[in-house]
Amino acid sequence: MNRKDFGQLVATLRQDLDWTQFRLAEYAEVDEAVISQIERGVKKYFEPELLFCLANALQLTTLERREFFLAASGLDQKQIVRQPSMATATDVFSVRKSLDKLVELTRLVRLPAFLADVYGDALAANQIILSFFKVPSYILETAPDMIGGYNTARVNFGKESVIRDRIADNWEGYALNSMRSFRERSLRYRAQPYFKYLMQTFRNQVEYPLFDRYWKMVSSTEQDKEIDTDYFVFQHDEFGRVQYAASSTMTITSFGELFLVQYLPLDEQTSHTFDKLAKEVGQMVVRLAPWPVKNFPKEFAVRSG
């Protein structure tokens, strides 16, 4: 991420808190002129102490801080991955190979699983997870014509959330864990046009009445999260009490990270439920959102970056 893009990211994070440059400078204990230089992309060198103070002021979680510091490195995504050469082979620059490999892995996993990108768009889901949450066919059929139609935020926080209907208790814990993952994976991409397009949609209180509440709640919770695993315990409306860990396997490509999310059972009842579903629906996978190119209005941009 170059200095101009990093400056836009800092501005986006500041604006998300409804802060002025002066207020961010005050909380970070730096001169306001420094914040202005960063956001305009004219400051070329970032002292470690400055980045530390900014991360503190912006109320970033541990995993968000890691993304923030990586963004400040000045390297873009194509520079982060191993470069091809005569001596080494890599698939990280191939959209088709990177995606096909992970979609196939999503199909083979005998647990509820889905593949997501940095924006929270579900690129593929196996039939086990679709059956576990009883996702109606119309959700998948209408997704291509809806803003954020394939996004996990739609499934979790939309006014017709299919997941909320399946959870008889502990919705609060489920929602908070889901939002935390959404925020952490997207941090480096918050200033990208496509993410801004999604946020404009998700902050519609009529269509997404719960989104903004949990978005703001993540940074204010006392318990931090330092591993990319979320724990869920709730009473499913059909399968009874389930307990599992949503564990993510990250794949780094030159187009951004991809996350294979798998539900690992933590008790015998949940293990039995997942085994039963796997036998009933078989090893099938449904491709969903496009990647890495996103389709959205020209006024935002032609490509998400």
Image (spheres, grey):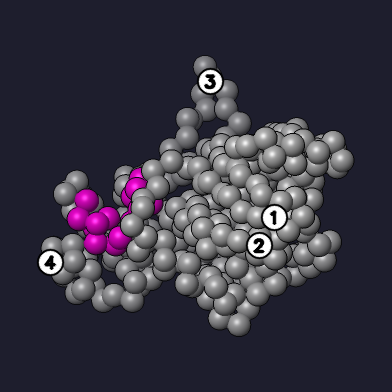
Say if mark 1 contacts mark 2, CB within 8 Å.
yes
**Taking 136 as reference, is 79 above or below it?**
above
Where does residue 118 sit, x and y in percent of width and height?
Answer: 54, 51
What secondary structure is the magenta-colored segment mainly? helix
Is the residue marked by circle 3 packed among few (<14), some (14-19), or many (20+) residues within 10 Å? few
- Write down the quadrant of residue 201 in the picture: bottom right
Element marked by disc 2: loop
Residue placed under numbered mark 3 in the picture: 88
C-alpha gap between disc 4 and disc 3: 46 Å
Residue placed under numbered mark 4 in the picture: 31
**Taking 298 as reference, is 132 above or below it?**
above
Which comes sooner in the sequence, label 4 or label 2?
Answer: 4
Q: Is residue 303 visible?
A: no
Which comes sooner in the sequence, label 1 or label 3?
Answer: 3
- Three-letter amino acid code at disc 1? His
Residue found at x 70% / y 60%: 166
Tell us which disc is closer to us: 4 or 2.
Answer: 2
Name the mark on residue 209: none
Where does residue 117 sit, x and y in percent of width and height?
Answer: 58, 50
Provide the residue span drawn in magenta: 52-68
Is the residue marked by circle 2 packed among few (<14), some (14-19), or many (20+) residues within 10 Å? some
Q: Is residue 221 left or right of residue 255?
A: left
Question: Does 58 lie within the magenta span?
Answer: yes
Where does residue 66 sit, x and y in percent of width and height?
Answer: 35, 45
Residue placed under numbered mark 2 in the picture: 168
Element marked by disc 4: loop
Residue placed under numbered mark 1 in the picture: 236
C-alpha gap between disc 4 and disc 2: 50 Å
Q: Is residue 296 left or right of residue 65?
A: right
Tell us which disc is closer to us: 4 or 3.
Answer: 4
**Taking 115 as reference, is 207 above or below it?**
below
C-alpha gap between disc 2 and disc 3: 51 Å
